[in-house]
């Protein structure tokens, strides 16, 4: 089970794990929600390129400007709209501040997709929590810099009384992808770019992947002969066909403000790290990254986000774990149960016949 | 005002009583009227993870699979102990249940015509793939065993067919016995290896519940169908199976996060499971006390069967509910995260600031 | 032979042959997946165009295959838009290929209750007839002081802000020569 | 557009740029990432506000107070860019002492004619140098060509003529006081005019807090000057008012005072909403102008060619408009070829004449009154997209024939079967006599041609595929229609048919057998007809002659086909050239990307600063040079001074950067050209629950109103009955849709993003009126009532105006009632009435008064009764809110010019 354990959790190179002979660099998104204008070009460009049918019943959902609701079989990019007044904003700043207090998070040196901290991301002034080697630093010991305190103080006085968050969500293309690992047919596979893609000609619509995704991304399209790939599991392919021709995925290409960035995942993570530092250095302590940590419950994601509040505010799980991480243990428990079943049956038949 | 990185000198603004609300006369408004603030724990109350697109076919299969597995054991036990009534009925029941169960599975697919794609790969990480192979193997053995059973009835026992069937009879009996335990147990893993919180968090106990339930159901069926003079083993099996099902079920509830246990107690699932407990318990007691009486055995058997079925439906329903309400996803994750943070473990969060 | 080939391409075998034991990668790909190409690559030609919605003037690339538009996306060469498009621009392909787009001339006769199909040539002839008649009927040669007017107030037009300059030019030229002055477009709205 | 990335501060007001121009907004985002401050001033917190540094909520229609207060702040605190203001604007120019300001006349300027509801602008003119020398009435800059009264200028919507430059002045011997101390200098007048526009007044009228005002003032002034520049962006949030043009003027004054015009990262960016709406004004499908902003002849003013030439091209005036005769002759030659001769005044009499305003709303009313027989709708959907949708649809039902050319079966084509008025019983399908021709057009990829985008850039689109089915381009359709009309008239000897028969209409065909768009573009570009370059295409408008030796379909577009090269089709990738990107498309005039860019250099011709250098004088080579085509005579040295009395381009000095203006200066004060005053002044909208706190004059006294029974208004201000319609509504677009929806509501990808008509209300208003998020509301104006789903949101802010809480309601206007679209719903434009800005005849659709109540609207005839019940409760009559003059003063009596005449 050791082999399986390694394959199911912790930092790893998913392309190598899938035994690609000619691997490419792992590709990914960095979605910087701080510059998203909520235009939904990503939703449309995605649907147009992938010929995704209309989603929903054309009802106004009454949730701000969001009328597509969530990621699903026919919405592979979804823009969330969140309206917040100052108390919520203060909470977001406070929770972001706590991330520093906790010394969170630290990228372990083994982080496979993280570049050296000095490489090309410019100076990162007042970066508490990381020393020059990139390792963790004990902040409680008084390392919390005066600069950080000052920016916090500055930030405290300037909480706006309202804000409107917009964020384009997408498949996370997890390092450890629950959907992929539970797929019984091989319809879901890991591409040479490290992304996770459904093969619509293979999928038989068992729906298992839907349940296995810790982010609620993949969904089975309802059976309806008038639409393509009906009855199939559907989700973002990171435009696998375009990637094979070195083209940018449709959403990232359309995004008017470059809120959605696409590229080599290590560069995306570096860009995200640089951006979050800039924001936080300027007092925006609510800024944080999501999915940029290979030690997390899914081994890091292929879609990194910069968020301005706790993940659950955006409908993202705060501490997701891929269910398959516990699979070896599950099999062990099931094995014991199976033995118990056999034993009990045997016991029933042994002994007296009446 | 949001996030200009270089905007360090935003004007001082009064936190809440500023222009936006203070101007409006300061009347406190009814929060329920508004575009709902995205709640701390969720995005407009929408689910974070998705419930699988499974309908009643799946719990039906869980039940039938268990019934088949338990019946397979009874058939094998009957064969080993030369109890023809149990052997015959066990074998036929196993085949019927496994066939019906397989049919239910196929019916639930989004693309039933691609059911055979289940055999396209062997995915050790996919309980459904593993289960499909188990099901196939069990089905094969059960078919052969049933055929052998028919072979015993053939008028020309000297024919090639009858001879062959006699030869394959013992291996088929052993095979279906061996595969019955995995068949009964894997369905627990199938449910647990998902992001549906209640299913996932019950992975330690659920296999025991399911194998117990399988034995109880099969014994129940045997109690109904078998002559009272041969039902001694199945009475024992009924009692032990029910005891395991009920005991493991209690353990499951006790060990689980109280919030995640909630769906097991509430609503439809709660009602189903309460009824299941009564029926299973009653069936077991009935089998114990009145099992030698044909009518008593029959009624107990019905209760056991129903109890097992309701257990499956109840567990299924509880898991589906836990996936639909975001609180079951977010709150335990949030607590888990805070607990780790309190313990000083900060390197494995998906939220990072760098 | 085919059966053998089919068997050999059975992913279960490929899993063990390729080292992709868990069946996650190349072992489980289908023929379709292995030969997948974007339609932007297989297009017969690419034409540079401009988005028809707002006035930012974003560059578009129109991909044509078998004389059908198969994709419209941003033109990265454009110094204005740098390849980006808004949701409307991104929906341009649907605008062009919309299954409910009207492609037939339709006619509703006076007091009619439904559309009738009509030949385009006939329709243009009928419009020309009506144009000439209305112009004649509503012609104003001079005002009450005898100052020249040389116009008709019986024919009007609205539209042009989504049309080409060349089209607006012909419309203005034709209508002005015909004396129709009530020519307007969205710029006044 | 790209130039916005160079700005240090961007104020977006009257525009929801992030939503309506998302891709253009990338340059704002880029500026912001580089450190620029972005401020959004808008009634609603929109997606633009969400991504700006600051949102300032403001009451719709009160912008002049806010901007006027900025002017006051700049002047009072000496924050203006002194060298720029003195050298490049008319701040130092002395205005006639006959001028009286609104501050003296309770909200009217001198020259108001109560009877006509208009201004005679003669008292606004510059004072002359050498008084008495001139025989004309002691003023120059007075009305050109026979003293044209504001009434007739308004009727022909003369404001539009200045699309490429200012109006004509007779000459430019003006008096200047460069110390700016003379009380009659523009500078001092400005100071006095805006002295009451204080932050406190802003708080009271706009509902903007004093702190917010100071934030904006600080951001703007700190980011303007030699080293820094600020930009304004506006859209129809400013134009769609009865005071629309003056909103923009106010911003222009700020930008001139701060020295932000003609400089990189500066200026005022008009964000237009249609692919070629700029082009359709340059080459107008508009009643009042000819291509290149030449006036359409007006009866009484332009009866003869000489009148016309004198009016448009006074040789004594400075600047490029002095050559307008050449542009006009070349246009007539382009249209009528050899039939246009010197002898027949270049066929000038072939042109029809205006007698008044014939804008789309006047036409609609005439249509409703049965005066219009035939109507062409070319990609427009007035039943949904124009103000007062009811009137639009009722008018369509009065036509004899209607031609609709659209990609989809729009509501304007199906009004006869599914207009809301059929449900109310006002219309009956069988009784509607309108004959409707629906002809499907080619889409943008099925034809070749140019769009002119919002910054005057022409971009050629290549044809990708042939149009399907019966679809054909407008070019082909109108070419064909013209041929058939001409065939029907062939042989006619009626003089009225000459203009059609003599029309040059023999265009070459392309390989598909269709008229060649390139040939039309060449005609627009112009060519030499005789002389040594005969047959060659014109290089630029300076090639054009008034002697009939050149033709040109639109003089400002001259050069787009210079040397036979279609420059609109230039496509050098942006990354391979400088950010100005001159080799991508072609901008008029002369491929210039920033107008008046001479102002980016100081009077000596040196860049104001290294950081903001753009165009400068190259002393060594004695030429203007820089990153863009200099908007100046290339070899005119900064030190050049014209002989007094010189007209035309040579009349401008080497430090007069505003080359299209008659005095080469940026106009803080407009002695001519604006029909509702030389300085922007706050008036309340036509319909407003607020009494004008500044003046007795409630609304723009020169606005165009139409007192008709089918165009009623709610009482305004403190008038009795105004409480019946207590709320302000404003209409707008969403990112996900396009105007009346013809190009979006039929597309599932866009429809699903915003599927239903909704209204946006504050939680306070929701509580007050019992509105529930996601529920329904009925909105009632003095015209009609519509229903909408409710979004209750903190993005809407109640404002305290003069001590009273004013609620604003947001209404997107994309939906229409019909059965053909993927999504449909009530149209917000139905709520609007028709009242127009006098300068450009654009309707006020950004602000109106209404009531809102929970629940869906009544069906059928009951809706009419609901509307009537409101009207009678409010005591609405045809006169309500239509009184033009409400000021206490009597400006005509105190106006000396009237005495003098």
Image (cartoon, coloured by chain):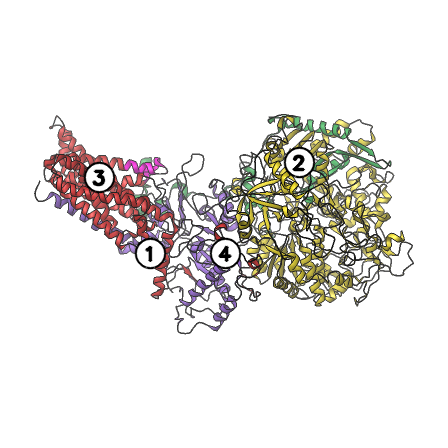
Chain colours: A purple, B red, C green, D yellow
Q: Which residue is mark 4?
A: A84
Does the residue at mark 4 contact the one at mark 1 (Cβ under 8 Å)? no
- The answer for which chain carries disc 4 is A
Q: Which residue is mark 3?
A: B305
Percent across and percent down for residue D51 are 55, 56
Q: Which residue is mark 2?
A: D377
Q: Which residue is mark 1?
A: A9
Dominant secondary structure of the residues highlighted in magenta in the image: helix
Res D502 visible: yes
Q: CA distance from mark 4 to mark 2?
A: 44 Å
From the viewer's perspective, is the residue at label 3 or at label 1 nearer?
Answer: 3
- The answer for which chain carries disc 2 is D
Q: Residues within 10 Å of mark 1 (few under 14, many from 20)?
A: many
Q: Residues within 10 Å of mark 2 (few under 14, many from 20)?
A: many
Give the magenta part as a residue range.
B102-117
Percent across and percent down for residue B326 are 39, 51
Percent across and percent down for residue B340 are 34, 62
Identify the residue shown where x is 71% and y is 28%: C130
From the viewer's perspective, is the residue at label 4 or at label 2 nearer?
Answer: 4
């Amino acid at each position: 089970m050791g082999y399986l354990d390694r394959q199911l959790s912790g930092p790893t190179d998913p392309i190598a794990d899938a035994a690609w002979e000619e691997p490419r660099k792992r590709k990914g998104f960095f979605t910087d929600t701080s510059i998203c204008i909520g235009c939904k070009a990503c939703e449309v460009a995605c649907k147009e390129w992938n010929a995704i049918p209309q989603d929903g019943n054309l009802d106004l959902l009454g949730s701000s400007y969001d009328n597509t609701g969530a990621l699903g079989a026919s919405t592979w990019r979804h823009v969330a709209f969140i309206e917040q007044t100052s108390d919520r904003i203060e909470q977001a700043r406070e929770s972001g501040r706590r991330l520093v207090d906790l010394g969170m998070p630290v990228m372990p040196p083994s982080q496979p997709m993280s570049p050296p901290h000095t490489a090309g991301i410019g100076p990162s002034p007042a970066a508490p929590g990381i020393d020059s080697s990139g390792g963790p630093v004990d902040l409680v010991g008084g390392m919390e810099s005066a600069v950080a305190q000052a920016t916090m103080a500055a930030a405290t006085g300037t909480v706006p009384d309202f804000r409107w968050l917009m964020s384009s969500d997408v498949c996370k293309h997890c390092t450890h992808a629950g959907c992929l690992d539970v797929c019984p047919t091989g319809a879901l596979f890991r591409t040479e770019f490290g992304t996770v893609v459904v093969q619509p000609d293979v999928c038989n619509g068992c729906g298992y992947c839907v349940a296995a995704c810790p982010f609620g991304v993949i969904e089975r399209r309802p059976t309806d002969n008038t639409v393509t790939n009906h009855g199939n599991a559907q989700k973002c392919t990171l435009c696998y066909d375009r990637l094979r021709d070195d083209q940018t995925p449709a959403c990232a290409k359309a995004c008017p403000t470059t809120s959605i960035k696409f590229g080599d995942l290590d560069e995306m993570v570096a860009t995200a790290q640089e951006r979050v530092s800039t924001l936080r250095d300027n007092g925006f302590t609510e800024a944080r990254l999501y999915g940029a940590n290979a030690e997390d419950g899914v081994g890091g994601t292929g879609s990194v986000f910069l968020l301005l509040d706790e993940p659950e505010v955006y409908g993202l799980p705060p501490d997701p774990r891929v269910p398959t991480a516990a699979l070896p243990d599950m099999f062990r428990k099931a094995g014991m149960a199976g033995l118990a079943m056999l034993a009990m049956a045997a016991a029933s038949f042994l002994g007296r016949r009446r | 005002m949001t996030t200009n990185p270089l905007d360090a000198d935003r004007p001082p603004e009064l936190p809440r009583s500023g222009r936006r609300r203070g101007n409006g006369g300061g009347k406190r408004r009814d929060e329920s009227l508004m575009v709902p603030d995205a709640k701390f724990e969720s995005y407009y109350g929408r689910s974070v993870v998705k419930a699988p697109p499974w309908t009643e076919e799946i719990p039906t299969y869980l039940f039938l699979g268990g019934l088949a597995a338990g019946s397979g054991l009874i058939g094998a036990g009957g064969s080993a102990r030369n109890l023809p009534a149990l052997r015959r009925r066990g074998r036929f029941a196993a085949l019927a249940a496994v066939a019906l169960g397989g049919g239910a599975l196929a019916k639930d697919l989004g693309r039933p015509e691609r059911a055979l794609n289940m055999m396209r790969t062997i995915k050790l990480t996919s309980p459904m793939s593993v289960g499909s192979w188990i099901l196939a193997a069990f089905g094969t053995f059960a078919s052969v065993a049933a055929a052998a059973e028919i072979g015993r009835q053939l008028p020309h026992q000297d024919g090639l067919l009858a001879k062959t069937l006699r030869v394959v009879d013992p291996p088929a009996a052993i095979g279906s016995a061996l595969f019955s335990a995995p068949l009964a147990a894997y369905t627990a893993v199938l449910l647990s290896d998902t992001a549906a919180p209640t299913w996932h968090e019950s992975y330690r106990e659920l296999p025991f519940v399911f194998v117990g339930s399988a034995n109880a159901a099969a014994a129940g069926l045997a109690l109904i169908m078998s002559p009272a003079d041969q039902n001694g083993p199945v009475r024992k099996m009924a009692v032990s199976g029910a005891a395991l099902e009920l005991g493991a079920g209690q353990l499951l509830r006790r060990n689980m996060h109280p919030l995640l246990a909630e769906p097991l107690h509430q609503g439809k699932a709660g009602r189903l499971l309460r009824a299941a407990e009564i029926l299973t318990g009653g069936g077991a007691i009935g089998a114990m006390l009145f099992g030698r009486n044909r009518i008593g055995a029959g009624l107990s058997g019905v209760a056991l069967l129903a109890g097992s079925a309701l257990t499956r439906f109840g567990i299924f329903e509880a898991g589906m509910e836990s996936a639909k309400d975001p609180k079951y996803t977010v709150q335990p994750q949030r607590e888990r995260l805070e607990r780790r943070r309190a313990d000083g473990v900060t390197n494995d969060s998906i939220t990072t600031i760098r | 032979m085919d059966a053998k080939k089919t068997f050999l391409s059975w992913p279960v075998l490929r899993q063990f042959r390729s080292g992709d034991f868990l069946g996650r990668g190349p072992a489980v790909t289908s023929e379709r997946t292995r030969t997948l190409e974007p339609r932007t690559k297989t297009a017969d030609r690419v034409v540079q165009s401009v988005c028809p919605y707002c006035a930012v003037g974003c560059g578009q690339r129109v991909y044509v295959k078998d004389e059908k538009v198969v994709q419209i996306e941003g033109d990265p060469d454009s110094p204005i838009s740098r390849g980006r498009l808004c949701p409307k621009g991104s929906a341009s392909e649907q605008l062009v290929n919309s299954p409910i787009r009207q492609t037939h001339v339709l006619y509703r006769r006076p007091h009619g209750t439904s559309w009738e199909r009509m030949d385009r040539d006939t329709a243009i002839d009928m419009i020309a007839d009506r144009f000439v008649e209305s112009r004649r009927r509503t012609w104003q040669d001079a005002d009450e002081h005898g100052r020249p007017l040389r116009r008709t107030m019986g024919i009007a037009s609205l539209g042009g802000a989504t049309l080409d300059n060349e089209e607006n030019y012909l419309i203005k030229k034709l209508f002005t020569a015909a004396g129709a002055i009530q020519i307007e477009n969205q710029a006044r709205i | 557009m790209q130039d916005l990335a160079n700005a240090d501060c961007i104020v977006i007001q009257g525009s929801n740029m992030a939503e309506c121009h998302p891709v253009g907004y990338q340059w704002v985002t880029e500026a912001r990432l580089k450190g620029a401050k972005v401020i959004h001033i808008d009634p609603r917190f929109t997606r633009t506000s969400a991504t700006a540094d600051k949102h300032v909520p403001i009451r719709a229609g009160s912008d002049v107070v806010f901007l006027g207060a900025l002017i006051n702040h700049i002047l009072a605190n000496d924050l203006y860019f002194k060298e720029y203001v003195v050298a490049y604007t008319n701040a130092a120019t002395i205005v006639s002492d006959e001028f009286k300001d609104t501050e003296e006349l309770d909200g009217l300027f001198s020259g108001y004619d109560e009877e006509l509801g208009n201004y005679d602008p003669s008292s606004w003119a510059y004072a002359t140098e050498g008084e008495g020398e001139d025989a004309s009435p002691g003023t120059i800059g007075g009305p050109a060509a026979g003293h044209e009264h504001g009434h007739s200028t308004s009727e022909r919507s003369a404001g539009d003529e200045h699309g490429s430059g200012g109006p004509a002045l007779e000459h430019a011997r003006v008096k200047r006081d460069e110390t700016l101390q003379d009380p009659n200098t523009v500078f001092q007048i400005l100071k006095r005019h805006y002295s009451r526009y204080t932050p406190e007044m802003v708080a009271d009228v706009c509902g903007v807090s004093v702190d917010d005002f100071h934030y904006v003032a600080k951001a703007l002034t700190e980011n303007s000057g030699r080293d820094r520049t600020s930009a304004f962006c506006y859209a129809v949030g400013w134009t769609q008012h009865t005071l629309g043009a003056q909103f923009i003027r106010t911003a222009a004054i700020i930008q001139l005072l701060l020295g932000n015009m003609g400089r990189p990262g500066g200026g005022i960016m008009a964000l237009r909403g249609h692919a070629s709406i700029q082009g359709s004004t340059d080459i107008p499908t508009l009643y009042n102008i000819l291509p290149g902003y030449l006036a359409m002849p007006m009866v009484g003013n332009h009866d003869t060619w000489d009148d016309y030439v004198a009016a448009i091209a006074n040789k004594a005036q400075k600047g490029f408009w002095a050559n307008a005769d050449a542009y006009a002759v070349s246009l007539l030659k382009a249209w009528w070829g050899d039939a246009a001769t010197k002898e027949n005044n270049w066929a000038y009499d072939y042109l029809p004449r205006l007698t008044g305003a014939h804008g789309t709303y006047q036409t609609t009313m005439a249509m409703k009154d049965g005066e219009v027989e035939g109507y062409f709708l070319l990609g427009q959907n007035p039943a949904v997209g124009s103000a007062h949708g009811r009137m639009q649809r009722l008018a369509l039902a009065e036509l004899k024939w209607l031609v609709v050319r659209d990609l989809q079966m729009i509501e304007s084509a199906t009004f006869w079967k599914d207009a809301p008025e059929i449900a109310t019983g006002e219309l009956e399908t069988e009784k509607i006599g309108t004959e409707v021709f629906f002809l499907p057009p080619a889409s943008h990829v099925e034809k070749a041609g140019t769009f002119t985008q919002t910054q005057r850039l022409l971009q050629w689109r290549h044809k990708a595929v042939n149009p399907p089915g019966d679809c054909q381009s407008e070019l082909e359709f109108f070419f064909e229609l013209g041929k058939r009309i001409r065939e029907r008239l062939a042989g006619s000897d009626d003089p009225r048919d000459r203009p059609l028969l003599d029309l040059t209409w023999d265009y070459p065909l392309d390989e598909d057998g269709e008229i060649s768009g390139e040939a039309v573009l060449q005609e627009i570009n112009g060519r030499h007809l005789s002389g040594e370059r005969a047959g060659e295409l014109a290089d630029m408008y300076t090639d054009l002659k008034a002697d009939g030796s050149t033709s040109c379909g639109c003089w400002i577009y001259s050069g787009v086909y210079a040397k036979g090269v279609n420059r609109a089709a230039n496509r050098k990738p942006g990354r391979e050239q400088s950010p100005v990107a001159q080799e991508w498309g072609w901008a008029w005039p002369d491929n210039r990307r920033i107008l008046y860019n001479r102002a980016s250099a100081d009077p000596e011709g040196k860049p104001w600063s290294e950081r903001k250098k753009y165009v400068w004088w190259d002393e060594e080579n004695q030429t203007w040079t820089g990153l863009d085509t200099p908007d100046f005579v290339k070899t005119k040295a900064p030190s050049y001074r014209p002989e007094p009395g010189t007209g035309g381009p040579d009349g401008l000095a080497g430090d007069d950067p505003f080359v299209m203006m008659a005095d080469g200066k940026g106009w803080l004060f407009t002695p001519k050209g604006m029909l509702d005053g030389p300085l922007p002044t706050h008036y309340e909208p036509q319909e407003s629950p607020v009494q004008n706190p500044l003046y007795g004059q409630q609304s723009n006294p020169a606005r165009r109103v139409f007192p008709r029974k089918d165009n009623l208004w709610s009482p305004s201000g403190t008038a009795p009955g105004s409480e019946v319609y207590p709320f302000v509504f404003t209409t707008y677009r969403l990112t996900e849709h396009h105007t009346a929806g013809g190009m979006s509501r039929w597309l599932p990808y866009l429809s699903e993003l915003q599927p239903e008509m909704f209204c946006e209300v504050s939680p306070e208003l929701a509580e007050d009126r019992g509105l529930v998020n996601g529920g329904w509301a009925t909105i009632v104006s003095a015209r009609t009532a519509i229903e909408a789903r409710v979004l209750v949101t903190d993005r809407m802010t109640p404002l305290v105006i003069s001590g009273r809480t004013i609620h604003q309601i947001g209404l997107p206007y994309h939906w229409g009632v019909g059965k053909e679209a993927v999504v449909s719903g009530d149209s917000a434009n139905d709520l609007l009435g028709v009242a127009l800005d006098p300068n450009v005849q654009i309707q006020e659709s950004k602000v109106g008064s209404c009531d809102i109540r929970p629940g869906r609207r009544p069906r059928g005839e009951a809706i009419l009764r609901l509307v009537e019940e409101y009207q009678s409760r409010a005591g609405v009559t045809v006169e309500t809110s239509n009184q033009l003059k409400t000021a206490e003063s009597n400006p005509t009596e105190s106006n000396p010019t009237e005495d003098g005449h």
